Amino acid sequence: MRRIINYAPRPGVRIILAALPFIAVLAIYVLASNARLAVEPNDKLMPALATFWATLVRMATTVDVATKTYLFWWDTWLSLWRLFLGLGISALVGLVLGIVVGFIPYLRSTFEPFFAAFSLIPPLAVLPILFIIFGLGEVSKIVLIVFGIAPFIIRDVMLRVASLPTEQIVKAQTLGASTWQMISGVVLPQVMPRLIDSVRLSLGAAWLFVIAAEAITAEGGLGYRIFLVRRYLAMDVILPYVAWITLLAFLMDYVLRRLSAAAYPWDKIKAA
Amino acid sequence: MTKIVIDNVWKEYDDRVVLERVNLALDDHEFLVIIGPSGVGKTTLLRLLLSQETPTRGRILIDGEPIAPEPTADRGVVFQRYSVFPHKTVLGNVMLGPQWAASPVLGRLFGARRRALEARAMGLLERVGLADSADKYPAQLSGGMQQRLALAQALIMKPKVLLLDEPFGALDPGTRKSMHELVHELWEENEMTIVMVTHDLSEAFLLGTRVIAVDRPRTDPQAPERFGATIASDFEAKIRAVRDSHRFESEREKLRLTLVSSHDLPADGPAVRALVKD
C-alpha cells in the first residue's frame, strides 16, 4: 500500500475523471428539474434543458421589437466591447507605468507606495463617484474596469521588473545599452509573458466590473439582461447567459494562453 | 595597452568596512586572479572594477583615466549565472551589443550590415564551439555552454578588460577543464586583461599570471566589522619575461616554417614585426 499521493491516474482515466463533476452537476440539475416540472409544469425556477435551448434560439435569431436588434448578439457585443476596451487600456497602462516605475529608482521610490495604496481602494465603492464625474454612459463603465484592474497589473509588472536578475541589467550596460535600449530590449520582452498571465488572472475581475456596472445602468449587455429579467424570474434566460459568459471567459483565457506560448516560446522552455 | 591602477581604495557600508587600503597596479595583458575566503570582499573588489559599486575612498584608473561611475562597454563581464538573456537565441545574444551600439532607437540592424554582423557573431560562436546551437535559447543549453555564450557575448564588444566573477563555480569538473582551456586561449588571442574571482586555488594558479589573495590582516574580536580586507599577498604566478620569451620563440618558429615552406616572405608581415619588436 503506497501513500495516496503516489497514485496517479492514467491519461485516459484522467479525462473521464475531469468530465465527472460536470456530468454530475448536469445530471443533478436535470433530475431536480424533472421532479419539479412533474409537480408544477409552469415552474420557472428550474426549467428543462429544452426550454433553455428554445429561449436561446429565440433571443439569437429573432429581432427584438423594442430595440430592433438580435438581443443575444447585441448583449454579447456590448459586454465584450466594454470588457476588451477596459482590459486593453488596463494592460497598456499597467505595462507602461509598471516598467517605467519599476525600472527607474527615482520613480519607483516616488510612486510605488502610492500605487500600493491606490490598489487597495475598492473599485465598486467609488463607482458612484465615477457615475457622477463621467455620467451614466460608457465612459464610467470603462473607467471602472481600468480602475479595478490597472493597479493590479501595474504592481504585477513592477514585481516582474524587480525580479529580473541584477546581473542581466549590469551585463546589458557592459554591452553598451542605454536606459531606453534596456527597457525595449531586456525588460519589455521579459515582462510580456507575465503581462499576458496577469491579464488572464484579471479576466474574472473584469467580468465582475462589467456586470456590476451594467446591472446599475446600461442600454444593453449580458449583465444588464440578467438583472433585467430577474424581475420575471426568467431562469430560462439567466442560466444560459451565465453559461455563455463562462464560456466566453474560458475562450479568452485559452486564446491568451496560446498567444503567450506562440509569441514567447522561450518562456515555456524556461518553465519546463 | 591597458593599465589598471587601484589607488588606495576603501569600501564601507555604514559602519562596516569591507575593503581597506587596496593598492594595485596591473600591467597590460595580465590574467589577474583574486582569491580569498568566502564573504571577504573578492566580489566587492570586482564590482568596484565594474562600477557596479563605487569606492567610498580612493579611485580606480584605467590607462590613467578614472573609470566611469557606471558599467560601460570598455569592461566586459561574465557572472557565475544570469549572464545571458533568456529571451534571445544564442545568435541573438551575441549580436545584442553591436546592434545596441549601431542603432540607438530600434536596437536592431537590417540588410547588409545585419548580415555582416551575423557573420562576425557566427565566427565567434564557432570559436567557442556553439555554432551548432545558434538558434537555441539559453535555457536549452547546458551550464558550460551558457558560460561559453556569455564569453562570446562579452568578447564581441572587444572590451579592454574582461571581468569574470566565479565563472566556472557552477560547472562540473570536466566542463570546467575545457572552459579553462578556452578562456586561456581567448585571453592569448585577444591580448586583453582578464580579472577573475575564484575560490579554487588550483584554478587560480593554472590560469593566472598574477594571483592576489584578499584577506583581513587585522581583526577586532569585539567588533569584527571594524577592519576590512585588503591584498594580503601578491604572487607573480607566471613571470612576464618567461611568457614573452615563449611567445617570441613560437612566433619565430612560425616564421621559420613559413620561410622554409615557401621561400617567400609573407605579404602581411605581422610575424616580421614581432621579430623586430622585442
Image (cartoon, rainbow, N blue to C red):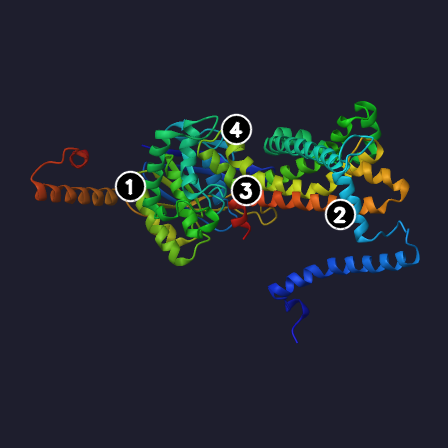
Res. A180 mark: 4
Q: In which quarter of the image is residue A20?
A: bottom right
The kind of residue on which mark 4 rests is: Trp
Q: Name the residue under label 2.
A: A243
State the mark number for residue A43: none
Do the CB atoms of the residues marked 1 and 3 lie less than 8 Å apart?
no
What residue occupies the far bottom of the structure in this picture?
A1
CB under 8 Å between callouts 2 and 3?
A: no
- Residue in the image at 24% along x and 45% along y: B242
State whether residue B103 appears in this view. yes
Which residue is identified by label 1?
A: B189
- Judge the density around disc 1: few (<14), some (14-19), many (≥20) Cα neighbours within 10 Å: few
Query: Along the polypeptide, which appears first: circle 2 or circle 3?
Result: 3
Q: Are marks 1 and 4 in contact (CB under 8 Å)?
A: no
Picture quarter containing residue A10? bottom right
Q: How crowded is mark 3: few (under 14 residues within 10 Å), some or many (20 or more)?
A: few
Tell me the element at label 3: loop
Task: Find out whether the residues at labels 4 and 3 contact each other: C-beta distance under 8 Å.
Answer: no
Chain containing the residue with disc 3: A
